[in-house]
Amino acid sequence: MRASRYFILGSVPIASALVLKNNVGRLPALGWNSWNAFACNIEESKFLTAAQKFIDLGLKDVGYEYVNIDDCWQVKDRRDSNGRLIPDPKKFPDGISGTAKKIHDMGLKIGIYSSAGTLTCALYQASLGKEAIDAQTWAEWGIDYLKYDNCQFPSNWNDKCDFCVWDDDRTSGLRNGTCTTSKNLCAAGYDYGASNTAKRFSAMRDALLAQSRPILYSLCEWGLAGVQQWGNATGSSWRATGDISAKWTRVLSILNQNSFYLNNVDFWGHSDADMLEVGNNLNVAEGRSHFALWAAMKSPLLIGTDLAKIKTDDLKTLKNTNLLAFNQDPVYGKPAMPYKWGTNPNWTFNSSFPAEFWSGAYSNGSTLVLMFNPYTATKTKTAVWGEIPQLKGGSRYQVTDVWTGQSLGCVQDKLDMQVGAHDTAGLWISGPCTGKSFSG
Ligand SMILES: *[C@@H]1O[C@H](CO)[C@@H](O)[C@H](O)[C@H]1NC(C)=O
Ligand SMILES: *[C@@H]1O[C@H](CO)[C@@H](O)[C@H](O)[C@H]1NC(C)=O
Ligand SMILES: *[C@@H]1O[C@H](CO)[C@@H](O)[C@H](O)[C@H]1NC(C)=O
Ligand SMILES: *[C@@H]1O[C@H](CO)[C@@H](O)[C@H](O)[C@H]1NC(C)=O
C-alpha cells in the first residue's frame, strides 16, 4: 500500500472505508457492463461500440464513464509462462491494453472481471492466490475498475458458518423470512470480517492498493458472509444479493432485499443492487421503476443492454438528470429510504409488494419522493407531506415532476398522482412555497 496515494481510514471495519485518490469510488459508479447484454459472447468491438454510444447518445455527458468487461475475456485454460492472465487474441487482438487505450482515448474508463476463486463463473482462469500478479497486470494494462466474483473457490475456503440471507425469489419454495443459507448459521455477534469470504475479498483489495493506479473495487460476493459488516472497508461497492436477471419478479425481489440493507450506504461504500436490466425484457414502466429505485438507493448504475439497439424511452430513463443528480450527490451521501411500505405494513419482507413510498434528501435542499406501483393496473398514489421525514411538518411545497421536469406548482398538504402498472411517480420537492398561489 502506498500511503501517499491510498489510505484506509481507521481500522474498524464497520466505520472505515476504502478511500482512493481522485475520488474514485466516493460516489456510486456509472457505466456499462457486457454481461446482461452479451454474457460470454464478447469481443473488443462490443466495448468500442458501447463507448462510442456513450458519446453519441449523450450518456457520457450525464456522467456514465465505466465500460466494463465481464467474464470470458481470456484464454480459458492457462496462464502465460510468467503466470499472467492471457487476453483471448481472437476477442481482443490488441490485448486488453489495446482496448483500454482506445477507451481512454474516448475520455472513458475501462473495467475488468475476475473471481475470488481458482476459476471464474464461466470457468476461465481466476485470481485466488494470484492476487498480486493479477492486480499488477491489470494496472499495467490501464484498468480502472475490477468486478470480483465469488465462483469456484476450493472447499478449504468455505466459511465456518453462514450469514442468514433472506431471498424468497427461489424455486425451492422458500417463504417470507426464511434463510436461504440455513444450514449452519453463525452465532449472534459473529464477526463476519473474520470469515473466509472476507479474507478472499480483502486479499484482492490489498493487491489493488499496492498499485499506483486507482482501481475501483466492486465486490460481487452475492450478499453473503455478512458483507454489510466488512464491505465498506474492503471495496467501493458490494453486492447486496444474488444475480439479477431480466425478469420483473427478480427486479422486485432484489429491490425488496436491498431496501433492508441501506443503513450501510454512504460516501465511499455502496450496496450494489446489481447491474441494470433496463432495455432487456422489461417494459418502459418497469425500466423506469428499476432505474429510479436503483438510483435512489445509491446503487452503482451499470447499464446492461445493447446500446446499439436501445429504445428511445429506455434511453430517456437512463439519462434522467434528476435521478442521476440524486445518485451522484456530491454533498449528501445517504440513499433514499422507504418511509411507508404501502400495501403491506412497514418493514414487511415481501418480494411481490416491497416498499412503495420512498424519500431522500438532496444537497440543494430538495427532497426526492418516489411512489412505486407494484400492481398490474393504474393506481392513485398519494404523497402526504406530513408522512415524509425530510419535510418536517411544513404544509405547502413547490413540486416538480422528476420524469417530465414540469412544475406541478405549489401544493398544499398532499398530492395525488395516477401511477401506471409497475411504474413509479417521482417528485422533487424543492422547498416551501414562497408565493401566494397554490393548488392541490
Ligand atoms: C464508510 O466509510 C466512509 C469513509 O470512512 C465513511 O465516510 C462512511 O460513513 C462509511 N459508511 C458507513 C455506513 O459507515
Ligand atoms: C435541486 O436539484 C434538482 C436536481 O438537479 C433540481 O431538479 C431542483 O430544481 C433543484 N432545486 C433547487 C431549489 O435548486
Ligand atoms: C409507516 O410509515 C408511515 C409514514 O411515516 C406512518 O404514517 C405509519 O404510522 C408507519 N406505520 C408503522 C406501522 O410504523
Ligand atoms: C406479500 O404481500 C401480499 C400483499 O399483502 C400478500 O398477499 C402475499 O401473501 C405476501 N406474500 C408472502 C410470501 O407473504
Image: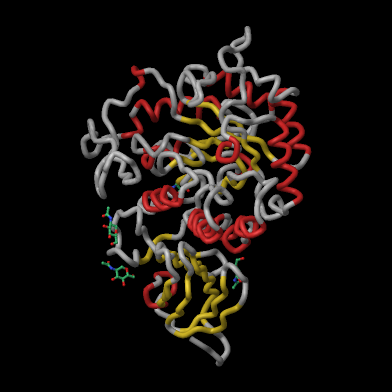
Against 401, residue 190 (above or below) is: above
Question: What residue is shown at x 75% (from left), y 23% (from top)?
Answer: 94
Residue 138, compared with residue 420, is above or below; it is above
- Total marks shown come to 0
| Image quadrant, ligand 4 | bottom left
As drawn, is 177 to the left or to the right of 299?
left
Question: Which quadrant is the N terminus positioned in?
Answer: top right
In this rendering, does residue 5 appear at all? no
Q: Is residue 146 above or below residue 266?
A: above
Q: Position of residue 231 (x, y in %)?
A: 43, 39
Query: Is residue 8 shown above or below 135?
Result: below
Query: Horizontally, is 199 left or right of 66 in the view?
Result: left
> Residue 54: x and y, percent?
71, 47
At horizontal 57% and vertical 75% (from top left) the residue drawn is 400
- Residue sitting farthest toward the bottom: 436
Residue 433 appears in the picture as rendered:
yes
Report the side of 265 relative to 114 (left or right). left
Image spot of residue 332 (x, y percent)? 52, 58
- Residue drawn at x 56%, y 86% is 434
Residue 436 appears at what percent x and percent y? 55, 92
Q: Residue at x 52, y 17 (%)?
A: 130
The residue lying toward the viewer, choosing from 234 and 218, is 218
Identify the image quadrant of residue 170.
top left
Say how the picture is coloured: secondary structure
Residue closer to the observer: 59 or 283:
283
Give the side of residue 96 with respect to residue 169, left or right.
right
